[in-house]
Image (cartoon, rainbow, N blue to C red):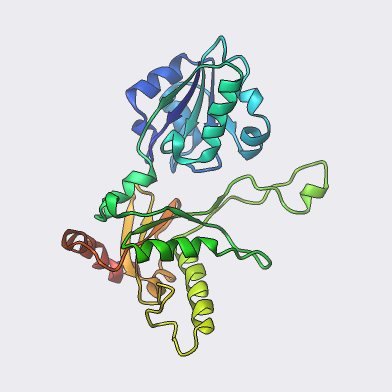
Amino acid sequence: MFYIIGLGLGDPEDITVKGLNIIKQCERVYLESYTSVLCCGQEKLEEFYGRKLILADREMVEQRADDILEGAESVSVAFLVVGDPFGATTHTDLMLRAKEKGIKTSIVHNASIMNAVGCCGLQLYHFGETVSIPYWDDSWKPDSFYDKIVANLKHGLHTLCLLDIKVKEPTLESLMKKKREYMPPRFMSVSEAADQLLQIVAKKSDAEAGVQPDQQNEHGLSENTLIVGLARVGHDTQQILACSLSEMRNVDLGPPLHSLIIPNGQLHPLEMEFLQQFAELKQQIL
């Protein structure tokens, strides 16, 4: 049997009783390490589970999936995922590969950022399509995600923005060599995401004659748009801040993982009342 087990968001104790019992009886246990990470780290997980974990990076999952599935026809193998197993398409692909090999699969669900964002008071059924904000570099600055944000706003829906992480990413130079060298891990912060959004706002404002960056224009966002930043959701050190897009650029919410929400412009009174407590934190954080 091949199990894909969600770990939740905060710490080792967030795993379900069902998931923990399965881990203890599996032949091998893999920990997926590139679509998301737990704040506590691998050692804390191993200590709590009482067994060693095999770290599964992007290269292993995408190029050596057969190694992960090896023997699962006759023994139990577990694949651990931060959040919920279906939070990333990679895990769906693993299930399809297992099916092709005639391996039985079982899923153990858990909380993920997709539903835990309700902690900020915005109602989950008011959320539209989730977007991912990727890191930019000097030559690659994709902004197609922005159109989805605008579409959500036009339909009166909030947008959850998942922020990029880079774990065990090979350097460009090493791709030409036989020996791989990797860049240091990077985790996008809410301030970095806000900066990229502001650059897009400025770019689109320049393209619209007579419209200033601080004005609400037809592409949806402005420097004054209300934004909600979240850090380490589900953890003891969780932080939430509601402020303008321009203010978010200067925010430091501490260590990863961070997420960003762009609320729609027509908040329910209960949403407004709940968010107010996080707007009051601005003076402490900014």
Quarter of the rendering containing residue 85 = top left
Position of residue 86 relative to residue 142, above or below, is above
**Residue at point 48% right, 64% down?**
147
**Residue at point 41% right, 63% down?**
151
Measuring from the top left, give residue 26's x and y in whole percent.
49, 16
* Residue farthest right in this picture: 177
Q: Can residue 32 be seen in this snapshot?
A: no
* Residue farthest front in this picture: 155
Q: Foreground residue, 126 or 10?
A: 126
From the image, which quarter does the C terminus lie in? bottom left
Quarter of the rendering containing residue 30 = top right
Q: Foreground residue, 172 or 1?
A: 1
Position of residue 270 relative to residue 17, above or below, is below
Quarter of the rendering containing residue 267 = bottom left
Position of residue 3 relative to residue 44, above or below, is above
Measuring from the top left, give residue 83's x and y in whole percent.
41, 38
